[in-house]
Image (cartoon, grey):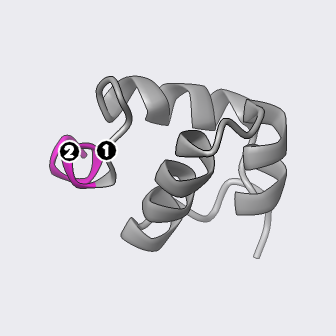
Amino acid sequence: MKKGDRRLNYEDRKKIEELNAKGVRIALIAEIVGFHRATIYNELKRGGVPYNADIAQKNV
């Protein structure tokens, strides 16, 4: 699979929600989930404050 062929799925969003709630840095979340940090920033905007994976999934 080449870079950029994968999209965030619900499991990725739940992992982002969990890590964000723990206060993990964006760059580290990106590394753990396997996406660019800009993707994580955009995802956090999509999911509301505080980030909620269910809301982000509905906004796709």
Q: Judging from the image, what secondary structure is the residue with disc 2 in?
A: helix
Mark 1 = which residue?
52
The quarter of the displayed image where residue 47 is located:
top left
- Residue neighbourhood size for the residue with mark 1, other residues' Cα within 10 Å, grouped as few (<14), some (14–19), many (≥20): many
- Residue at 62 percent of width and 51 percent of height: 19
Image-based side of 12 in relation to 1, left or right: left
Q: Amino acid at mark 1?
A: Asn
- Residue at 53 percent of width and 43 percent of height: 21
Mark 2 = which residue?
55
- Residue at 76 percent of width and 76 percent of height: 1
Magenta region, main secondary structure:
helix
Image-based side of 49 in relation to 2, left or right: left
Give the number of the disc on residue 40. none
**Picture coordinates of residue 45, whole percent (x, y):** 40, 23
Q: Residue furthest front?
A: 22
Image-based side of 29 in relation to 45, left or right: right
Q: How far is the residue under mark 1 from the one under mark 2?
A: 5 Å
Q: Amino acid at mark 2?
A: Ile
**Picture coordinates of residue 30, whole percent (x, y):** 75, 46
- Residue at 25 percent of width and 46 percent of height: 60
Queried whether the magenta region covers residue 9, the answer comes back as no
- Residue neighbourhood size for the residue with mark 2, other residues' Cα within 10 Å, grouped as few (<14), some (14–19), many (≥20): few
Part of the protein shown in magenta: 54-60
Q: Judging from the image, what secondary structure is the residue with disc 1 in?
A: loop
In the rendered structure, are the residues bearing label 1 and label 2 in contact, judged by CB atoms less than 8 Å apart? yes
Image-based side of 58 in relation to 13, left or right: left
